[in-house]
Image (cartoon, coloured by chain):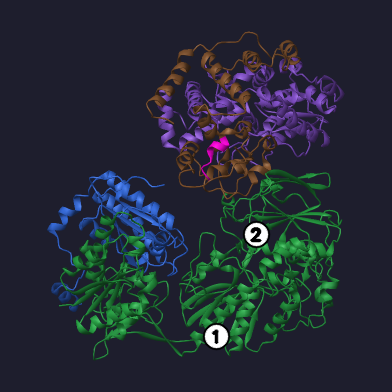
Chain colours: A blue, B green, C brown, D purple
Amino acid sequence: MHTEKEKHTFEPKIIAFVCTWCTYAGADLAGTSRMQYPANVRVLKFPCTGRIDPVFILKAFQQGADGVLVSGCHPGDCHYIAGNFHARRRFAAFRKLLEFVGVDLGRLQFSWVSAAEGGKWVEMVTGLTEQVRGMGPMQEFKELALEEQWSGSIDTPELQEAYDQI
Amino acid sequence: MSRIGVFVCHCGENISRTVDVERVAAEVGKLPGVAFSTDYKYMCSDPGQGLLKKAIREERLSHVVVAACSPRMHEKTFRKAVESAGLNPFLCEMANIREHCSWVHEDRDEATVKAIEIVGMMVERVKKNRVLPTITVPVTKRSLVIGGGIAGIQAALDIADAGHEVVLVEREPSIGGHMAQLSETFPTLDCSQCIMTPKMVDVANHPRIKLYTYAEIEHVEGYIGNFQVTVRRKARSVIEEKCTGCGVCMEKCPVRKIPNTFDRDLGMRPAIYVPFPQAVPNTPVIDRENCTKFKTGKCGVCQKVCGPGAVDYEQEDRLIVEPVGAIVVATGFDLYSIEEKPKGSSIKGYGEFGHGRIPDVIDGMTFERLASASGPTGGKIMRPSDGREPKQIVFIQCVGSRAREKGISYCSKICCMYTAKHTMLYHHKVHDGQAYVFFMDARTPGKSYDEFWRRSIEEEEAVYIRGMVSRLYQKGDKIVVMGSDISVGVQVEIEADMVVLATAVQPRKGADTLAQKLGISYDKYHFYSEAHAKLRPVECATAGIYLAGACQGPKDIPDTVSQASAAAAKVMTLFARDQLEREPIVARVRETGCVGCFYCKKVCPYGAVEEKEIRDRQGNLVKVVAYVNPGVCGGCGTCQATCPSKSVELDGYTDEQIVAMIESL
Amino acid sequence: MKKKKMLLSAETMDISFVRKVEALSGTSVRRCFQCGKCSAGCPMATFMEHPPNRVVRLLQLGQWQRILAGRSIWYCASCETCSTRCPNKVHLASIMDALRKLSWDAEGPSKESYVQLANKLFLQNIRTYGRQYEMRLAAVFNVKSGQFLKDLMLGPKLITKGKLKMFHQKNKNMTEIEKIFSRIEEMRKNGEAL
Amino acid sequence: MTPKNALRYAYYPGCSLHASAGEYDLSTRELFKKLNIGLTEVPDWFCCGATPAHNVDELLSLSLCAKNLELAEQVEGDLAVACAACFSRLKTTQHILSESEFKRQQVEKAIDAPVPLNGNVKHLLDILARDLGLKRLGQAVTKPLSGLKVACYYGCLLTRPTDVPNLDCVEAPTIMEDVLQAVGAETVAWSHRLECCGANFTLSRPGVVVQLSHAILDSAKAAGADCIMVACPLCHGNLDIRQKEIEGVYGTHYAMPVFYITQLVGLAAGLKADKLGLDALIVNPMPLLKEKQLI
């Protein structure tokens, strides 16, 4: 059924970190099945959720993301044997940290979406978008970002010097 | 300064219908570093690729972004094109504006803005891409085939005939699979055993096929060209090398009343047995659960009567490691059971058909055993309850299949044809009997298939009734079938002597566990997923692993054999080369930064991290750092996210590249 | 009507009616693939001119007039066998409820006035008394349907067995029930409810 | 004084139990008293709307049930329901309203109160078989119903539909058989346990009822049952009150008493005939009970 599209005053920016084997493929399936979901999400592809450094999530919030979705293969289905287990443990600890620094955990979602679950991908993205829309824009980290410049590379001369002395 | 070229594809109308591609090309062209941007109807076509190559040469492009479909679709295509124009292929990236944009949004404006952002993100990423050298690895020219049904047998024979060694692993004590259980096959009514058993013997006698029956895959490591597979050979309690297959042990075994699963529990077998007389290998196995010797310690008759002394009660499971370069998965199917709660399944049974409690309600495979000349009744159709010949027989199609309610919404593909075959076999054997078939649709696409189905109606006088059955119940020694004929619009009731259910085809139990060992993906029903539904139907997304037969989806015998031969051909293509190029997506350690904590070693799923000593010129040990063996590294990047000093980087997914993407948003 | 040729076009297939049925019943009409299992198990199918599967088929084609003109929907016993066994999770019992509601609202033509009359009296009874009053229900039904002698032999027996009470307890909280009825009427008038 | 852990329920008898099925009400109250299970009737309950309401007006049906659920909140304990139709309507209402936010809002507007969706609605069978437990039920038996062959008749609504979490397996329930076996009766396997009796067509189209109930009686007799047990006043009406008529139409002879579950269990628990309302049954059960030495 075609529903009239609502116009919203606030369109949240959602960044999704996904693994290439399951969730990226699941999102592709949503596409080939012509399912519809909000256009708020931007997908970043990783080989595996194990590759996703929690720093990227902070970075995303700093960069103006209002919500972050991290999604990979179901436990046991990892293409790289066990990368998603490491990711799961890492993010379990990381959530606590985020909560401690005052990020509303409603803005961050972890999930498993397999290559066969196009529908689940649509649900996840739609759900998170609506949820974050209700929460309003994320302000805290944007202000921080102005003060701090994080290059992503640690090849600063100071560090290099420190290493050379080891 | 980079000179990036951006190529936006219309994909016919697939992208341009919702995304304003000209606007995308124009907007992206304004980004710093972008030297050239254009759009084209079909980028992946020959002229499209030509356009790309020409631009690289004429515009002296340093990097390329193709905004088109999913990289899973055409990344290889475009990287090849880039390479032929003289650029390193890893300086080309794809922006997915079809699956992730034009196909999932309706609002043209929104979709266009999103597409611009996606392409912009990839532009920022590609700036940080580095030249990556291709890595070559040797190929072990041996193949593993998992499953010894018709699919596994065909694949193993084809590969072995091409001159390569094959390890064939079968879970049951004999190869043969489901096809060995069938009576006759559609649409020719060939005797299944007659066409199957010679192939089984060929496998047993082939000099290049190493056969492990009663064995399972324990563990798989490695990657394309270089897998290490651990096989568990379960304790057979009979030494295969010594056994001559004389069968005396089976004759003398005092335990005789164990239902034979090969005969769908219609016949009995002893505790030491071969599943069926034509078994390959013809070596018995002791069923330890039912053997008196194993239960009470007393007996030992089989050991006493065995001339060659092949019976060994002490035998234990053995683990064998086999190095192989390619794997063919051919694990086949199971039939759906209408029981209340089929074990280990979320799929519901059929209460309305009595949950399988009415003895003369059987499934199609049981009917095959009844009709088989080598079956428990010698090919005579009789009721399991009292041995009488059924005079009124009802077949019900789509039991479990196309039943969203029960948890399966697919069509099992083979049931229409085998039910038509069953009505014929029944009519040939019970001349005064009448067969009825309740069906929804007859799906008979295949050479000579529809003619076969029509023959069952026009010549063999089967009565086909369009409409499903609501309920079965026992009334005296009859089974009342409550159905309806929707063509006429009235209810139909038949008092049947026997009811045969065409139950759905499901993947083998444990298919998910095996997939996890192999690192391949599967769908929600646990059928294994092919890399591309149309263009790569026999390969898994995981390189070096191929699919054959019903483990990938319901299939009949001709389709299964075709796919098995196709999988074999893929293996031969791989084995035609001595060296294999692999994606250089591997981790590298920056030794200056490494503090030698070896967290990376702990998390590496491939065991690719080694310890490397760094010495000064005098030979004094300076420090121990991590080293990633590029041949073993799988490229998951878990080490990089774990490294506390950020000293290991995954090529192609460096922090720089990812941060550049995040920052572009 | 029922043997008249179906002329199908975008105009003659009334899909808005189907949408209404789907909204009321909360189940998909298009999902039905006409396997006929509902008709096979329906205890009332022999009394209907359109068996259940055909009711859904006519609905799929937007031919609701053909359904409402007949008595099929009024002969459904609401036993839910169809919904329970449907392989496709089509809740046919709810579709039947929706069709009856739409027919009732439209004061639709129906050959089945007895069932409608019984339903009407039943609901009137609830509105007036809060509870069902079987004696009155049966008596009024017989008078209104003109079957003065129907079940004549049962009456005295039931009364002696204490099964038909001549007087019954009236609910003490009658204003509440009246409010529910009138609120629903109000909501319908304002277009807030179907 | 009831002990602290004693079972206590709010009781929704439904219209029929206050009229044509008075014996069901009586035997339920007496049996529960005997088993030390507390029953407090929901004050001022309304008709649930039964089949006629949901047949033509879902909103009305949902609202009536929701109102009753709301009224039941006044009484402590889960809601015990005797009539299969009331049970089905109340359960289904809870299910539909928890699935559909839209419908819940409409209903709350109609009854001008929030709908309690988490309260447990339990059929008497559920209370006997699970809350009390078959073991304790067995212990309460003073006169086992040995030798009595009973056809347990579920009818349509007790276990349906599948998507509403319900009493027992929708196609192969055993709860009635379990309860009866616990009190020493013999249950027969028969084919028409779940077939429809014709339900409320008893008023408008009695011919339908005669035809359908005939098949049920026939099947029970063929299976060798002495009597039928039901848990629904409408099923009872059709099988018991119309039995004579069915015999007349088909020229058969059944004399098959139709008991309510509470009557049979009550009998086993040692309750006397007058406390069970056995005299209210149209098909006289006395010859059978005397023959089996149960009375």
Q: Nearer the viewer, residue D131 or A7?
A: A7
Q: Earlier in the sequence, mark 1 or mark 2?
A: 1
Specify the segment rendered in magenta.
Answer: C61-67
Residue marked by disc 2: B442
Q: Which residue does the numbered mark 1 point to in the structure image?
A: B142
Q: Is residue D6 visible?
A: no
The answer to whether residue D288 is visible is yes
State the residue at coordinates (83%, 27%). Answer: D254
> Which label is found at residue B549?
none
Q: Amino acid at mark 2?
A: Ala
Mark pair 1, 2: CA separation: 43 Å
Residue C190 lies, in percent from the top left, at: 37, 26
Does A76 sit above or below residue D131? below
Image coordinates for residue B569, horizontal then vertical, percent: 54, 83
Q: Badge 1 local density, few (<14 within 10 Å), some, or many (20+)? A: many
Name the image quarter holding the C terminus of chain D: top right
| Badge 1: chain ID | B
As drawn, B286 above or below D139: below
Q: Nearer the viewer, residue B126 or B482?
A: B482
Front position in the image: C134 or D41: C134
Residue B296: image x %, image y %?
77, 63
**Callout 2: chain:** B
Does dot 1 land on a helix, a strand or a loop? strand
Could you say whether the residue bearing mark 2 is in a helix, strand or loop?
loop
Looking at the image, is C67 positioned above or below residue B168? Answer: above
Q: Amino acid at mark 1?
A: Arg
In the picture, measured across the screen, residue A158 lies left or right of residue D72, that is left
Taking the magenta stretch, the answer to whether it contains residue D177 is no
Quarter of the image where one finds residue B595? bottom left
Residue C65 percent across, percent down from the top left: 54, 36
Name above or below for residue D264 compared with residue B586: above
